[in-house]
Image (cartoon, rainbow, N blue to C red):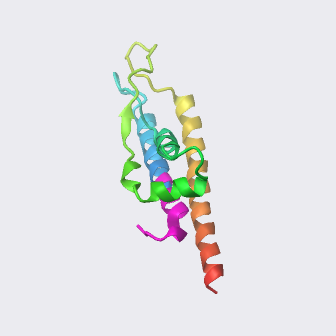
Amino acid sequence: MFTTDAFDYINIMDKAADASWLRENVITNNLANVDTPGYKRQDVAFSGILERELGKGKYYQTLAKRVQGLNTHLDDLTVESYTDAANYSYRLDKNNVDVDTENVELASEQLKYQLLTNSISSEFKRLQTVLK
């Protein structure tokens, strides 16, 4: 990772893109296990972690200062999948994967990933323009 201020947003978007990619994989795994008896769906919660970490800054700080502070602690933005055991199953086989919900979540996550990668690319183009 870069440590200069010019890459603060890029580093955060890189972490978000990694989390989005992981969530896409988790959702496709859920869809693959839709007929597995007893399977409990998995998910990834990165947006809540990012909100919590950005919220740790003082209330009078600008977003740029909060991102700069968060950029020095990128390890706090760890992303892991978790089992959604609280999502009760009404199926006899105790599987709690709903195909329709998972497909909507997958489409949403694919759009989010595409937006993040386009944003990272745009940031690099802006830096490239400045360097010319």
| Left or right of residue 66: residue 37 | left
Looking at this view, name the residue that lies furthest to the left: 38
Instruction: Name the foreground residue: 85 vs 59.
Output: 59
Name the residue rendered at 46%, 38% in the picture: 45
Q: Which residues are magenta?
A: 1-16
Q: Judge from the rendering whether residue 120 lies leftward or rightward of residue 23; answer left or right.
A: right
User: Residue at coordinates 40% horizontally, 22% vertically from top-left?
Assistant: 95
> Residue at coordinates 41% horizontally, 20% vertically from top-left?
86
Q: Quadrant of the N terminus?
A: bottom left
- Residue 56 x/y as whole percent: 48, 43
| Principal secondary structure, stretch drawn in magenta | helix
Q: Report which quarter residue 120 is drawn in.
A: bottom right
Residue 3 colored in magenta in the image: yes
Across and down, in percent, residue 9 comes to: 55, 61
7 over 47 or under it: above or below: below
Q: Position of residue 75 (x, y in %)?
A: 36, 53
Name the residue: 57% across, 43% down: 59
Q: Is residue 11 magenta?
A: yes
Q: Is residue 30 above or below residue 69?
A: above
Q: Image height check: is 62 above or below 37? A: below
- Judge by depth and name the residue closer to the eye, 129 or 6: 6
Q: Is residue 68 above or below residue 96?
A: below
Residue 18 quadrant: bottom left
Q: Quadrant of the C terminus?
A: bottom right
